[in-house]
């Protein structure tokens, strides 16, 4: 190839590259403008600005109704879940809270996307922020608001993906030392320590009235366990197989969770309940695959999110009695990530 032909070749490549980048930039700008327009449209539900958390009892959640307030943390009275929503000005991917504070896991999109957790006070003002090492997945707070757990995806995008990796930690809201990555805790299964490098921990749930004990999911070498954790002892002890994203009942006697009846690649999660004293497991009749961490409305009713068919980014919160014959019913439409505050 002659020098002239070579220069022409590179000039053509440069022109093509510029055109492609310009087209991509134009598409991104149009897509962003459409997103902004959709968020400025009238909301599909009745909303109002909330300057503070309401008096308990209430339900805290992520608003997924199209229009103004999409993605914002919101509340409704527990006695009127279909009532007007009071929305904060903080957008969250996952939210959980108490009567005095709220944790919001969020994605900050920009030239460089990053992730963070924000601790909000009763007036929806941030008390602290800390960086998260990956995409938000799960969060929980202890009933007194002193402990916050966060689970993020470090690689992969779902628990059904082969080779996913998570990072889970517990932080203190009083400024005290947290746990760091729970993978550093000793994982004990049938009396033996599991030290395999593929250990994953996710889906923490706290025990009412006990600042040291929590439950979570642990996985290694293709096996999954419900583990009972101790913050002081830095241990995770397996007590049952096949439990994902546990949630302890208010009375502390049962754990609700999702169990996979599909395959690791094509998961289908059923809702199940474990009696901690007897070890008896009850599987509920909900036929849909429920990829959520269950929330207890009370000692007899469960809440969980279900994505809306054909409506990307939208979801509803459903309720079902903790009874194998029960059928699910809609609890809050256009909502996600429920937290019951009494």
Image (cartoon, helix red, strand yellow):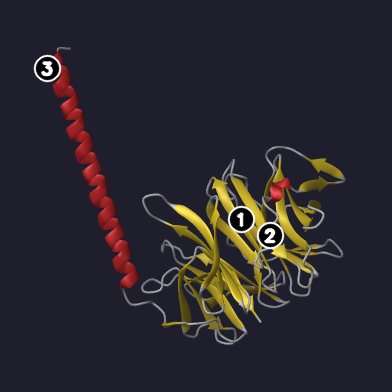
The answer to whether residue 200 is visible is: yes
Check the picture and name the quadrant holding the N terminus. top left
The answer to whether residue 291 is visible is: no
Percent position of residue 8, x then y: 14, 23
At a point 32% along the width and 63% down the height, the residue shown is: 35
Label 3 environment density (alpha carbons within 10 Å; few <14, some 14–19, many ≥20) = few
Residue closer to the observer: 305 or 127:
127
- Circles 2 and 3: CB distance less than 8 Å? no
Q: Quadrant location of residue 232?
A: bottom right
Report whether 271 appears left or right of 116.
right
Check the picture and name the quadrant holding the C terminus. bottom right
The residue beneath circle 1 is: 151
Residue closer to the observer: 278 or 12:
12
- Circles 2 and 1: CB distance less than 8 Å? yes
The residue beneath circle 2 is: 204
At a point 66% along the width and 76% down the height, the residue shown is: 297
Give the number of the disc on residue 4: 3
């Amino acid at each position: 190839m002659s020098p002239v032909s070579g220069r022409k070749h590179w000039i053509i490549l440069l022109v093509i590259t510029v055109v492609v980048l310009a087209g991509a930039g134009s598409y991104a700008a149009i897509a962003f403008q459409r997103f902004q327009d959709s968020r400025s449209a009238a909301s599909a539900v009745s909303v109002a600005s909330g300057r503070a958390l309401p008096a308990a009892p209430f339900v805290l959640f992520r608003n997924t109704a199209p229009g103004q307030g999409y993605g914002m943390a919101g509340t409704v009275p527990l006695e009127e879940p279909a009532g007007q929503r009071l929305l904060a000005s903080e957008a969250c991917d996952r939210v959980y809270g108490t009567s005095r504070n709220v944790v919001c896991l969020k994605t900050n999109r920009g030239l460089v996307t990053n992730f963070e957790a924000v601790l909000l006070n009763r007036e929806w003002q941030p008390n602290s922020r800390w960086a998260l090492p990956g995409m938000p997945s799960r969060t929980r707070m202890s009933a007194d608001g002193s402990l916050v757990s966060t689970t993020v995806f470090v690689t992969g995008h779902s628990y059904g993906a082969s080779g996913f990796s998570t990072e889970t930690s517990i932080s203190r809201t009083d400024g005290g030392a947290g746990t760091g990555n729970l993978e550093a805790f000793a994982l004990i299964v049938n009396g033996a320590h599991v030290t395999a490098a593929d250990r994953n921990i996710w889906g923490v749930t706290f025990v009412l009235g006990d600042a040291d004990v929590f439950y979570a999911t642990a996985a290694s070498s293709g096996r999954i366990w419900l583990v009972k954790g101790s913050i002081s002892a830095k241990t995770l002890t397996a007590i049952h197989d096949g439990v994902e994203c546990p949630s302890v009942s208010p009375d502390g006697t049962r754990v609700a969770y999702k169990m996979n009846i599909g395959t690791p690649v094509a998961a289908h999660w059923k809702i199940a309940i474990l009696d901690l004293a007897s070890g008896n497991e009850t599987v509920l009749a909900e036929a849909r695959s429920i990829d959520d961490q269950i929330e207890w409305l009370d000692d007899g009713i469960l809440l969980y999110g279900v994505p809306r068919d054909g409506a990307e980014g939208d979801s509803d919160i459903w309720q079902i009695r903790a009874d194998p014959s029960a059928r699910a019913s809609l609890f809050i439409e256009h909502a996600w990530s429920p937290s019951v505050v009494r």
